[in-house]
Amino acid sequence: MVEKKRQVYLDYGATTPVSPEVFSAMEPYFQQKYGNASSIHFVGQEAAEAVGRARGQVAGFFNCQPEEIIFTSGATESNNLALKGVVKKYYARQPGGPRPHIITTKIDHHCVVDSAKALEKEGLAEVTFLSVDKEGMVNPSDLQAAVKKNTILVSVIYVNNEIGVVQPLAQLTGLVKRVDPKIIFHTDAVQAAGYFDLDVTKLGVNLLSLSAHKIYGPKGVGALYIKKGTAVSRMQDGGGHEFGLRSGTLNVPGIVGLGEAVAQVMRNREKDIEHVQILRDKLLAGLSQIEGAAVNGSQKQRSPNNLNMRFANVEGEALLYSLSLAGVAVSTASACASKSLKPSHVLLSLGLPPEQAHSSIRMTLGRYLTDQDINYVIKIFPEIIKKLRQISGDVLQKRLSQKEKRLPDDFGC
């Protein structure tokens, strides 16, 4: 459709490239410093020291104690451990007790929603899935009304992975704690980590999930903050690593990379915010000129790097493919669900009809984008939309024509 002149990556919400600083920090732990951090000899202790430094870096990022950080394989494991671990510990402490109640939202990440559904299906928990308004915001009154006597856990995503909407997390945690201070509050903060303060004391959370590859770190490593005294059971048995909560040989290079990634975020956050917000707003201004274009989710309470838009009479998958041919990478939903043909559960939760959800794409910006990249996207977009609408119109006209041929001569008379 459009001659491919350059490559523009607008899918930083799916993953980010490993930064040079992170790669440099990781490199020695693949070959020179390759020890198992659980080994007591000097090679193992060299690795253990590196893990300890990284744990301290992540703890500094969260403003918590190092022993409150559990390293995992990423956000999916962290979120599963948070929800299922809390419920499992509840039953360990109260065998035969009443079925516990947990609350999450309809727009949380699949790994949270599906974990909650699994607990519900197995009869281990009663679950309330909170609705959101048309801008994707949780109503604090709805959350307060949902709390019951048997509520043990609330999980609300900080920044939505598809539409970038930012929930007033400190307000929500404060509300829940006032109703019942014993309720555990978890948040998936994966998309928030690069642009928002994750001070767990200010946020008021008991559990918080993080993934390295969303903040210019490596894939396959993440963390779960567990506030001291929070009751969580391990989900896998083994050698008792990570304070007995996550057995398995530690991914030392990955953990080192996560530590350096959060250190980089702390140094570069303000600069990154300014950079991506300027480019995002320019992209929004350019694409808003296209007839039938609209933004999904709140424009005010939104992460600076996220732009989720729909384009009337255009199929999102076709738009993604056409943009890819032109050298522009976007997504139609979260990366985890990008191969699904089902409408986004997040967009449907905003009240969008399926056809509008299907006409949407997500564009997420990052550190290495340039002004020239955005100019290129704005330039090629209208032509692609025009051709896709023409194709869509031709297909519709063909279907109508075929339908008319099957109708009787006196149809409608």
Image: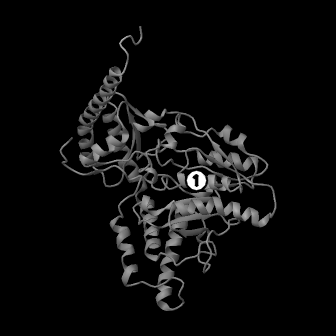
Foreground residue among 275 and 342: 342
**Left or right side of 83 for 282:** left
| Count of numbered labels shown in the rendering | 1
Write the residue at 60% across / 53% down: 203
Give the percent coordinates (x, y) of residue 239: 60, 81
User: Under tag 1, what secondary structure?
Assistant: helix
x, y percent for residue 146: 71, 42
- What residue lies at 59% left-to-right and 72% top-to-bottom? 246
Q: Residues within 10 Å of mark 1 (few under 14, many from 20)?
A: few
Question: The C terminus is located in which quarter?
Answer: top left
Residue 230, can we see it? Answer: no
Q: Is residue 265 above or below residue 46?
A: above
Q: Is residue 403 visible?
A: yes
The percent position of residue 215, horizontal first and vertical second, equals 42, 59
In the displayed structure, would residue 10 be above or below residue 298?
below
Q: Residue at x 34, y 49 (%)?
A: 10
Horizontal arrangement in the rendering, residue 326 relative to residue 235 (left or right): left
Residue type at the position of mark 1: Asp
Q: Residue furthest bottom?
A: 41
Q: What is the quadrant of the N terminus in the image? A: top left
Left or right for 153, reference 109: right
Residue at the image point whose x is 25% and y is 33% from the top = 387
Q: Give above or below for 171 relative to 289.
A: below
Q: Which one is nearer the viewer's eye here, 196 or 378?
A: 378
Q: Position of residue 138 (x, y in %)?
A: 60, 40
Farthest residue, direction top: 413
Q: Which residue is mark 1?
A: 114
